[in-house]
Amino acid sequence: MFKINSNLFHPERSLFSLPVVQWTFLVFLCIAIALAATIAIIDPAPFSMTSAGLNNAAEYFKIPLAILAIGLTFIGIYGANHRSEQTKKQIERALTQIELSNSQMKITKEQNNFSNFYKHIEEFDKYCNSISTEKLKITQTRQLHRIIFPKANAISGNYEVSADFISDLEKLVNLFLDLSNGFNDENKEKRIGAAFYIQKNVRKFNEKHYFKMSNAGIPGKSHLYGLETFTIHDGGIKKIATDFIYLVSKSDEIISFDLNYSPSRKIKDLSEVDLSLVTQDAELKNPFDLNKLLIK
């Protein structure tokens, strides 16, 4: 298939400044002039500025005029091809500009994500420090940030709260509600066991999430449960419930750093428990139905 060399039709130049157009026009013009001159010399004819005279001249020089028309036809073809090259160049420029714009947007987005990521960590660190107390401290805020926002990094910009962290908290609440049934058992050993397992699971939760709860200065009594020794501090059931609700409330407050987070109904209800109705007994001497207060 015939294809005109696109290098001859530089899209940055005008049509009549192209050498191929100039040479084509010049060649056909020269041929037409040469033929017209030859005809005029060999077979001279009278010429008049009348309608008949002009018609005779057109008929007389029809071959040179046809040659010139062919040349103009070629120039018309060149013009169409030149416009095609210009359109192609404009499309290439537009695509290049789009690619450049997309690349710049991508770079800008990556830079923003990078900046936002470290800003998010910095603000989370400040937030955690502002809500930490002597009773509950966060030992590693950046590690906790990684746990609560596992998808967050300098590239993604995803700050969705971890479903696993929320699940861990809700599992701990459910476990506490189940174990607290033991406080209402007539068997003192079972009441002690309930306190033991609550403390054990709270400790595991705290270690996993870099929480440190302190009971410094609060007296208590050591108990042996199974092969392990643990302390029940003065205040008994009330102290255990108070510490647990405090932990849940603080955990909920930490997750609330994400403004899209909404606590479950169970966590809300737990934070509203009236602990003044809970008996104070350092050794859990008497049964107490804590779930009447905890479960609504």
Image (cartoon, rainbow, N blue to C red):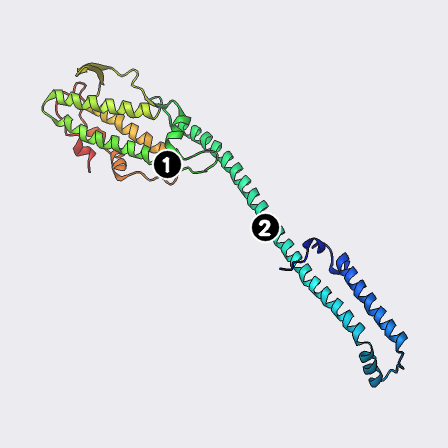
Residue depicted at x 19% and y 24%: 237
Asked which secondary structure carries label 2, the reply is: helix
Q: Which of 67 and 96 lies nearest the eye of the viewer? A: 67
Q: Is 277 situated left or right of 152 in this image?
A: left
Residue 30, disc: none
Which residue corresponds to mark 1? 161
Decide: is 60 above or below 220. Answer: below
Q: Is residue 61 left or right of residue 6?
A: right
Q: CA distance from mark 2 to mark 1?
A: 39 Å
Outermost residue on the front side: it is 42
Q: Position of residue 132 (x, y in %)?
A: 37, 25
* Image coordinates for residue 29, horizontal then vertical, percent: 81, 66
Position of residue 166 relative to residue 78, above or below, is above
Which residue: 43% across, 38% down? 158
Q: What is the number of the mark on residue 95? A: 2
Quadrant containing the N terminus is bottom right
Q: Quadrant of residue 206?
A: top left
Mark 2 or mark 1, earlier in chain: 2
Q: Nearer the viewer, residue 211 or 149?
A: 149
Which sits in the foreground, 107 or 59? 59
Height in image: 207 above or below 33? above
In the picture, residue 28 is in which quadrant?
bottom right
**142 relative to 43 in the view: left or right:** left
Task: Judge the density around disc 1: few (<14), some (14-19), many (≥20) Cα neighbours within 10 Å.
Answer: many
Residue at far left of view: 186
**Within the image, what quadrant is residue 15 found in?**
bottom right
Horizontal and vertical percent for residue 40?
A: 88, 75
